[in-house]
Image (spheres, rainbow, N blue to C red):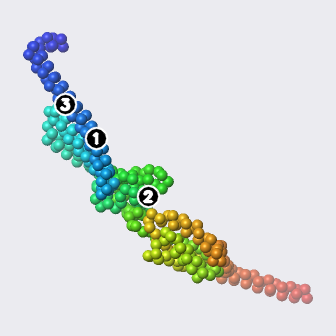
Amino acid sequence: MENLLVEISPGGWAFLLDMLTAFSIHLGAAAGILVIGWWVARRASMSLSRLLARQSRMDATLRPILCDIGLWGIRIVAIVGALSQLGIQTASIIAVLGAAGLAVGLALQGTMQNIAAGIMLLVLRPFKVGDYIEGGAGSVAGTVDEVNLFTTRLTKPDGICEYVPNSALWSNSIRNFSRNPMRRLDLEVEISIGDDVDRALEALRTLAAADPRALRDPAPQVMVIRFDDSTAVLNIRVWSNTDMFWTMRWELARRVRQTLTDAQCSLPLRTRELHIVPSATAASVTGAAAGQAGSSAIRKPEQGV
């Protein structure tokens, strides 16, 4: 090794020094481009987020997606610029990335499905941030906090945060409880079968109409929907604004019992009558046994004589 270093001419040392100097400069420039690009991307994403937040017409559902697109767009430009400083041809990089992207896409089909589902959710907009939805065949429910390319972040009614893959939402039906301005309340009430049904209907109709949260159009309805074991089941149907739905439901449920008591309707006690009918086989056996007993009772006096 020492002999090899001795045999290098002064011109060779100058060439190596120039090469290392040039490579160091390009390497430093590439590192600088990456650092500056990451910093600019972060600052641009934050500025874009603040700008979109001030726009009243910009939906909060699209805001994080647009910020992420701007962030990674600047980062990709910085990566390509850094590779160009190192002497790597960007055309070959794009070709390699295309082939690698195809292979990765085949390997990560589920992830690609989430991206495609996220794009469809953003384009068709079945829900937006702040809506309460139910999806995933009824296994997912909560208030939408954020929609990303891969997942949707929900807050459940008990305050737990849940991340749901976009494909799980898009591949099943979605129930949006906040989209329409009005909702209908269906409240079932039971009374005893011996109570005055008409008086109970009138009392419940008055109760529903007196609630200030109940809409007048459509008007509240109270009807008998079925008869169960010793009970008559009544149904209260009241329309209200979506934001007042649960408040009205709890208040009506609290006042229904006292209203029925004032209408002289008692709390139903479920009873069921059972009539045991002997089968034909049991009746024939019982009849044969009774016939044998009667014949023996007749023969006994004869034997005594």
Going from N to C along the chain, the mark reached first, 3 or 2, is: 3
Seen in the image, is 53 located left or right of residue 200? left
> Where on the picture, by quarter, is residue 204?
bottom right
Q: Nearer the viewer, residue 251 or 112?
A: 251
Mark 1 residue type: Arg
Above or below, comparing residue 293 to residue 73 in the picture = below
Residue at the spot 14% in from the left edge and 37% down from the top edge? 89
- Residue 49 image offset from top left, x and y in percent: 30, 48
Q: Tell me which residue sits at (87%, 88%) in the image.
A: 302
- Identify the secondary structure beneath mark 2: strand
- The kind of residue tagged 3 is Ala
In the displayed structure, would residue 254 be above or below residue 114?
below
Q: Which x, y percent locates residue 134?
A: 42, 60
Q: Is residue 52 visible?
A: yes
Identify the residue position indicated by label 1 in the image: 43
Q: How many marks?
A: 3
Earlier in the chain: of badge 1 and badge 2, it is 1
Residue for badge 2: 141
Q: Secondary structure at mark 3?
A: helix
